[in-house]
């Protein structure tokens, strides 16, 4: 459990570094980057993930040298100040991990395990900003991991599965989009299982955070969507289909032979597991 918890944090650290580095190189220190930096507990991040903290601090110092913004200077000074105090001792780090594990035990651990179980796969992928209206092939056995940095009204994110049967293959897909940027309402559909239309089925309790880490996992029995450690959809192919899909839903139980992502959602990062 301790290893999984540490690796979960590494996902967060790597996502933060990748996203901020990309934005700083392309746009400078924009609103989304500042938002993530403001939300970050600098002291805890330094204690728990010292290598990522050191890399991020050095990067911020370099890119902010000519910046005149008071808020940016204050944020960078906070990072430098924390670095100057030195990295915590190993006993302090162990205490931090114990605190995190205790938090997990007090909560619904299954929610967090979905993120933690992907930690081995993070090493084989690269976070990219995919182009709109372009297909991106992924490893068919992997969950699909995304980061959205803002709600975009009615912009689609779709995951296509090529499902192999005896003598034939069928392509089915799951798609979702934000229907209301103010109430944070997201709808979805699953071809072959639900009404093929938006604003009919809705994700449950989508976190209101501006930055969202999504994990879409498909098995032979379920399609599960986790957003910032909250399960917002846990669709059972055998029982949750809408009337009229009594036969077509069975396709989803087949082996997945190919997987791809398509989207017209602009502010999105994808963990690319196939280069």
Image (tube, grey):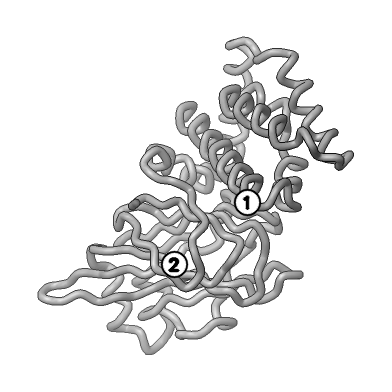
* Residue ID at (74%, 14%): 85
Residue 172 visible (yes or no): yes
Residue found at the very far front of the displayed protein: 66
Residue 120 in the image: state x and y as whole percent. Answer: 38, 37
Residue 45 visible (yes or no): no
Residue 251 in the image: state x and y as whole percent. Answer: 27, 74
- The numbered mark, 2 or 1, whose residue comes first in the sequence reads 1
Q: CA distance from mark 2 to mark 1?
A: 38 Å
* Residue ID at (68%, 28%): 57
* Residue ID at (42%, 41%): 122
For label 1, the residue is 26
Q: Nearer the viewer, residue 243 or 85?
A: 85
Q: Nearer the viewer, residue 195 or 83?
A: 83
Residue found at the very far bottom of the displayed protein: 244
Contact, mark 2 vs mark 1 (Cβ under 8 Å): no
Residue 62 in the image: state x and y as whole percent. Answer: 69, 31
In the figure, is residue 191 to the left or right of 99? left
- Residue 262: quarter of image: bottom left
For label 2, the residue is 235
Residue 139 in the image: state x and y as whole percent. Answer: 31, 54
Q: Secondary structure at mark 2?
A: strand
């Amino acid at each position: 459990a301790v290893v999984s918890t540490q690796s979960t944090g590494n996902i967060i650290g790597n996502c933060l570094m990748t996203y901020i580095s990309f934005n700083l190189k392309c746009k400078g220190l924009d609103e989304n980057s500042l938002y993530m930096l403001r939300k970050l507990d600098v002291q805890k991040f330094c204690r728990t993930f010292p290598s990522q903290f050191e890399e991020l601090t050095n990067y911020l110092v370099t890119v902010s040298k000519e910046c005149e913004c008071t808020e940016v200077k204050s944020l960078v000074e906070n990072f430098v100040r924390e670095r100057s105090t030195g990295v915590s001792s190993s006993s302090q780090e162990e205490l931090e991990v114990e605190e995190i594990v205790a938090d997990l035990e007090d909560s619904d651990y299954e929610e967090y395990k979905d993120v933690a179980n992907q930690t081995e796969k993070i090493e084989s992928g690269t976070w990219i900003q995919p182009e709109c209206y372009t297909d991106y092939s992924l490893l068919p056995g992997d969950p699909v991991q995304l980061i959205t940095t803002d709600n975009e009204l009615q912009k689609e994110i779709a995951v296509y599965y090529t499902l192999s049967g005896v003598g034939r293959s069928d392509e089915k897909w799951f798609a979702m989009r934000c229907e209301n940027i103010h109430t944070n309402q997201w709808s979805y559909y699953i071809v072959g299982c639900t009404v093929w239309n938006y604003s009919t089925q809705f994700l449950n309790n989508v976190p209101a955070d501006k930055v969202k880490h999504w994990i879409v996992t498909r098995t032979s029995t379920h399609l599960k969507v986790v957003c910032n450690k909250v399960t917002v959809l846990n669709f059972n192919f055998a029982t949750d289909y809408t009337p009229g899909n009594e036969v077509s839903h069975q396709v989803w139980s087949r082996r997945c032979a190919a997987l791809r992502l398509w989207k017209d959602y602009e502010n999105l990062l994808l963990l690319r597991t196939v280069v």
